[in-house]
Image: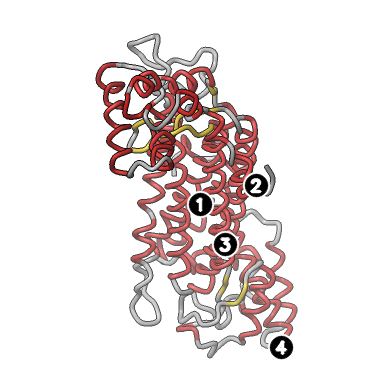
């Protein structure tokens, strides 16, 4: 997590101040529940809330931890310094460190997911707007990077909208799955704490009680969460790669907005490079890399070990902060993307009509020519276009074997660009619920 690729709202979730505030709330809510059950005096539970508006001294907690070598104990010691030793006497009653740490981590991940869901909403809105803007802007479709058949720029945006909508649904499920808490004590048996304390704390923190937690919350939940972030990052790269290709000089169907005063190269003043989408490609790689250690965290020894802890201290902030930044950057790229319809048309026309070869092939088969024979007829004329720069329609009209089956008018009709766009409304209705 570095400032260059960070946004303040997400960073704040992972700050020490936020972490200690959540720890405090968990401990204080647990005290309320225990007091209500008669486990501890109500006055002690109420006294802990004196720290409600106190700014915890991070430096002091770190100082204590250097002696205790235990972060939760360091915090509890500092809390006792604030509210008084007697008031703090029953803090953490029957609880274990993982109750605080795991519940806090899941609070943070759920809050991070809320920001990411909002990010996806903004990206979806941008993709939708651009899709309808260019719904019928013709563009060559490519397979293997080679011209295939016509499509539209609107369908390109719609395709990525559908992909990101799936990602949003995945993240919403992952957020629901991660939003559990555990206040179950050592090895998760509730031996020294009533399960109703866990229910109260979870309700106050916006979580559900973990059905069975051993001493830690099961890490398959976290694995799925980070795997979901990795899938979203891959979709970010998918869209970024499309834009990078479109911005290539030989293609130039769209490009990132180049702001006044921006420089593309320290050596070549003419350069306008796709630096934002190249950056997004790199950021996606980083987010994806964090899924593997999350998956490896699932296997822990018996009721718990802490092999997962160091991993999560890094990937929790890094994955969410990086993806938050990437989604916001990608939204800006889409909103400001400069589209060149005239270049799209020029690219459509570059191969002398070859993009209509399948229609000619099908027309010949419908007139009784075998598929193999029709393919050979079309391909031999298409290769003249590839190799000699000929005009495909003219070659077809001059081929006696083709003309024996198709009239000039029938050949010309197969070169109608509108034919390829006739189901755009149907596709848009599937993606957006409207044509």
The answer to the question of whether label 1 and label 3 lie on touching residues, with beta carbons closer than 8 A, is no
Which mark sits nearer the N-terminus, 4 or 1?
A: 4
Label 4 to label 1, Cα distance in Å?
35 Å
Is 148 situated left or right of 42 in this image?
A: left
Horizontal and vertical percent for residue 270?
Answer: 40, 10
In this rendering, does residue 254 appear at all?
A: no
Label 4 to label 2, Cα distance in Å?
59 Å
Label 3 to label 4, Cα distance in Å?
34 Å
The answer to the question of whether label 2 and label 3 lie on touching residues, with beta carbons closer than 8 A, is no
Observer-nearest residue: 299 or 278? 278
Please name the residue shown 38% across and 39% down the image: 282
Q: Which mark is residue 59?
A: 1
Which mark sits nearer the N-terminus, 1 or 3?
A: 1
Picture mark count: 4
Label 1 to label 3, Cα distance in Å?
32 Å
Residue, disc 4: 38
Are there few (<14), some (14-19), or many (20+) residues within 10 Å of tag 3? many
Please name the residue shown 39% across and 32% down the image: 405
Residue, disc 2: 429
Which mark sits nearer the N-terminus, 3 or 4?
A: 4
């Amino acid at each position: 997590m570095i400032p260059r690729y960070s946004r303040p709202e997400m960073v704040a979730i992972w700050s020490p101040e936020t972490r200690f505030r959540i720890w405090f709330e968990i401990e204080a809510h647990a005290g309320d529940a225990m007091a209500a059950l008669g486990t501890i005096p109500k006055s002690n539970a109420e006294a802990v809330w004196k720290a409600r508006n106190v700014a915890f001294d991070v430096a002091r907690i770190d100082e204590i931890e250097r002696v205790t070598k235990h972060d939760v104990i360091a915090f509890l010691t500092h809390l006792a310094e604030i509210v008084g030793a007697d008031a703090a006497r029953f803090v953490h009653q029957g609880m274990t460190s993982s109750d605080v740490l795991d519940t806090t981590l899941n609070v943070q991940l759920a809050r991070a997911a809320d920001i990411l869901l909002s990010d996806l909403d903004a990206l979806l809105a941008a993709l939708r707007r651009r899709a309808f803007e260019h719904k019928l802007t013709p563009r060559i479709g490519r397979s293997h990077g080679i011209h295939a058949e016509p499509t539209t720029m609107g369908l390109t945006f719609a395709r990525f909208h559908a992909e990101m909508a799936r990602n949003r649904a995945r993240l919403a499920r992952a957020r629901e799955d991660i939003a559990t808490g555990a206040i179950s004590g050592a090895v998760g048996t509730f031996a020294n704490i009533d399960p109703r304390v866990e229910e109260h704390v979870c309700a106050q923190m916006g979580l559900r009680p973990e059905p069975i937690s051993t001493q830690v919350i099961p890490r398959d939940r976290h694995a799925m969460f980070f795997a979901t972030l990795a899938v979203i990052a891959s979709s970010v790269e998918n869209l970024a790669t499309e834009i990078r290709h479109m911005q290539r000089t030989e293609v130039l169907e769209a490009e990132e907005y180049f702001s006044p005063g921006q420089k593309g190269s320290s050596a070549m003043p003419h350069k306008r490079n796709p630096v934002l989408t190249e950056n997004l490609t790199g950021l996606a790689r980083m987010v994806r890399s964090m899924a593997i250690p999350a998956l490896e965290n699932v296997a822990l020894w018996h009721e718990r070990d802490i092999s997962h802890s160091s991993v999560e201290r890094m990937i929790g902030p890094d994955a969410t902060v990086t993806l938050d930044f990437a989604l916001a950057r990608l939204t800006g790229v889409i909103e400001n993307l400069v589209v060149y319809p005239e270049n799209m048309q020029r690219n459509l026309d570059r191969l002398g009509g070859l993009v209509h070869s399948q229609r000619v092939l099908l027309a010949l088969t419908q007139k009784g020519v075998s598929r193999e024979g029709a393919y050979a007829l079309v391909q031999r004329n298409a290769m003249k276009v590839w190799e000699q720069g000929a005009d495909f329609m003219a070659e077809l009209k001059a081929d006696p074997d083709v003309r024996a089956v198709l009239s000039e008018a029938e050949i010309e009709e197969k070169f109608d660009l509108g034919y390829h766009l006739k189901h755009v409304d149907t596709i848009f209705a599937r993606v957006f619920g409207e044509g």
